[in-house]
Amino acid sequence: MKQNILNNLIYQVFTKTIKKTNLPIVFNKTRLKQTGSFNNPYINHYDITKKNDINKSDSNKIEIFNDIVGYDDIKRLFLMAINSFEPIHIALAGPPASAKTIFMKCLLSLPHSYFVDGSNMSKPGLIDYIFNNKIKYLLIDEIDKIPPKDQTVFLNLMETGIVSETKYNKTRKMETKISIFATGNDLSKIIHPLRSRFLSLILKGYSYDEFHQIVTKLLSKKSINQKIIDEVVYAVWYNIKSKNIRDCLKIAQMAKSADDVLFLVEIYEKYNIKKRIN
Ligand SMILES: Nc1ncnc2c1ncn2[C@@H]1O[C@H](COP(=O)(O)OP(=O)(O)OP(=O)(O)O)[C@@H](O)[C@H]1O
Ligand SMILES: [Mg+2]
């Protein structure tokens, strides 16, 4: 009897203390125990404050694309990739002068970004740079110009984040979180496993209205008269039959009058310069 009263007392004291902690209580026939351990510190795997901070700072980043006219959907996509917790890899392909390189240049304003010219890349140089610097965004312009044997350097980096190198029988290895943003005229020139790791977007050529709008924005920054701009756009599109914005920029920078525009367009047509620069 005495033992029963004692047990009851112990039981009540225990349950009171445990209930205060709000942790689940598990009863079984012989033991009364509390799940959860006071020794394990609580780890917040999803820190909402930090997430909001990222969104706050990145919501302004649309400004990094101010030099690019249009492509609002692609700008938004890049911002989503930048805000992603895991690396996202995006490749832009498309015709000459469709703003691929300017996208890379704009992204270069992000902290921890690094620009690589694919036609001139040294694989050991790139690996060294990755080992010695904190890179978050690797921007590769003209990735299709990298020889296929060197393209393999990106495979593990993109899939697992691991970069490794074996030199003089010594291996070094590190884990990274790098997003690769790349461009190319022809993504079929990159090895298939690499291509499949990218979200690839094929840019279409511009319509006349888009072409006119872009050239107007670029040339009015250089204080070129709207009449000259209209003449240049019309002549490049219809006479030279070029859709390359670079042709407009070249002609407009030399022409002081509508007459000059006609003269330059005739030179283009006569010597067929267009075919060489497109
Ligand atoms: N949407 C655009 N907004 C602003 N400028 C543009 C746009 N599209 C083209 N341009 C202008 O056209 C020129 C060429 O652009 P860019 O170098 O980005 O082309 P690209 O797609 O990389 O071409 P390529 O395949 O020849 O390398 C630049 O002067 C750029 O300012
Ligand atoms: Mg380019």
Image (cartoon, rainbow, N blue to C red):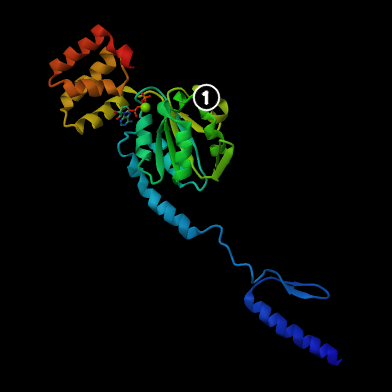
Label 1 sits on residue:
148
What secondary structure is marked by label 1? helix
Choose top left, top right, bottom left or bottom right for residue 214: top left
Q: Please state the total of marks drawn on the protein image.
A: 1
Q: Position of residue 92 (x, y in %)?
A: 44, 30
Question: In this view, which residue lies farthest toward the top?
Answer: 270
Disc 1 packing (10 Å; few <14; some 14–19; many ≥20): some
Which residue: 67% across, 68% down? 36
Q: Is mark 1 within 8 Å of ligand 1?
A: no
Please state, as top left, top right, bottom left or bottom right, where the N terminus lies in the image: bottom right
Q: Position of residue 56 (x, y in %)?
A: 40, 53
Q: What amino acid is at disc 1?
A: Pro
Which residue: 55% across, 34% down? 155
Which residue: 44% across, 32% down? 182
Asked if one can make out residue 23 in the rendered structure from this viewpoint, the answer is yes
Residue 1 as seen in the image, left or right of residue 218:
right
Which residue: 71% across, 80% down? 15
Asked if one can make out residue 203 in the rendered structure from this viewpoint, the answer is no
Residue 11 as seen in the image, left or right of residue 95:
right
Q: Position of residue 190 (x, y in %)?
A: 51, 25
Question: In this view, which residue lies farthest toward the right?
Answer: 1
Residue 232 as seen in the image, left or right of residue 54:
left
Q: Position of residue 189 (x, y in %)?
A: 50, 22
Q: In the rendered view, would you say 59 is above or below 222?
A: below
Q: Nearer the viewer, residue 110 or 122?
A: 122
Question: In the image, ligand 1 is in what quadrant?
Answer: top left
Choose top left, top right, bottom left or bottom right for residue 103: top left
